[in-house]
Image (tube, helix red, strand yellow):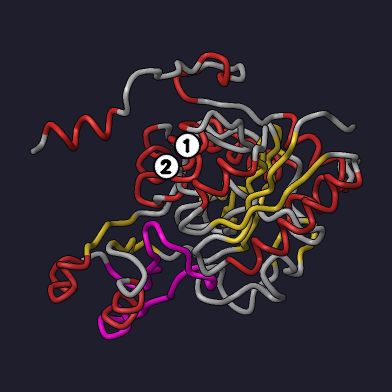
Amino acid sequence: MSSSRKIGVLLGGFSLERDASVRAGEAVTAALRRGGHEVQALFVDRHIDMALRQSGIDVAFLAVRGRYGADGCLQGLLEMLAIPYTGSGVLASGLAMNRAKTKDVLRLHNLPVAPAYLIRAQQQDHSSEVHGAFGFPVVVRPVGATLLCGGALVRDEMELESALEDVFGVDDEALVERFVEGRPICVPVLDGQALGAVEVSRAGSWTAQQAVGARGQEICAAARLPPAREASVLRLATQAYEALGCEGPACVELVVSERSNEIIVDLDFVPLLLPAAPLPRMAREAGIGFDELVEDILAGARLRAHGIRRNRRTAHSVFEGPDRRANAALAAH
């Protein structure tokens, strides 16, 4: 379904997942062009604000992952520029990118998460004291940055110090979580509707090893769960999605253990849009092709600040007086 709007596909960014983001952005661009849309790919860098102003796009389709792309920063810039965008808003994106705050919100909604504590870089020399009697094994992950392997599985104090050093190389805060052994399950969610559950094959535990296959091309298989357990997993994923105020597409990662209940591990509010990735895979099984999925996500693009659901380009006041920054500079002298 073509339209008169010019669509900008934002891709790339600064995170370790830049290459995967570029591939996903290229796939989205191709799908939109097949639908008859006017599309421009915009690479996210330090000059993205100028690129957005000069591009003249009417809608932003976000394919950017990681820091500055999926953490609310880019969403806030688009709100300021009054450019409707796909996916979740500023608050939900910021919460989902901060794993510690995500856990806090999920706990407030009585949703199951692994016990954990936060340790900051300035506490690194006293990590043993901070850890105290928390016990082992644990998983160490950055709070806000991306590690492609997910985290480090730690079994003693020496491994803890090494894992913290790695994390503090990319982030100022680390999340230390109780390790829960189980099967890694991913539940893609679209507009509040869980599409199903897939199991992502990993060379080891869900936290300690990379998935089998390149990012966005992991080996996925339908999760074979008893009907009651599958219903519980889908319900928890939907509740987590709603608790954090997510919109549009998302993927909720859980651990399903034979000895305990399901545990929510992570939420990805900018899931990779590659044909082999979990969201497009499950959408396809639900009868939604890749091009149709892209169109559905595009249809949800809007501005979200202050709860105003219409395009606010016409609602923005135009400042017609002398330049305020110039006045401020003169007043300072």
Kindly identify which residue carries mark 1. Answer: 92
Left-right relation of 282 to 61: right
Q: Check disc 2 and give the amino acid type.
A: Leu
Q: Quadrant of the N terminus?
A: top right
Q: Residue at x 91, y 46 (%)?
A: 34
**Label 1 residue SS:** helix
Horizontal and vertical percent for residue 15? Answer: 50, 64
Horizontal and vertical percent for residue 278? Answer: 73, 55
Q: Which residue is drawn at 63% across and 35% down?
A: 235
Left-right relation of 120 to 3: left
In the depicted view, which residue is nearer to us: 329 or 186? 329
Kindly identify which residue carries mark 2. Answer: 95
For the record, the magenta segment spans: 135-160
Q: Residues within 10 Å of mark 2 (few under 14, many from 20)?
A: many
Q: Which residue is drawn at 81% across and 41% down?
A: 38
| Relative to 187, residue 206 above or below | below
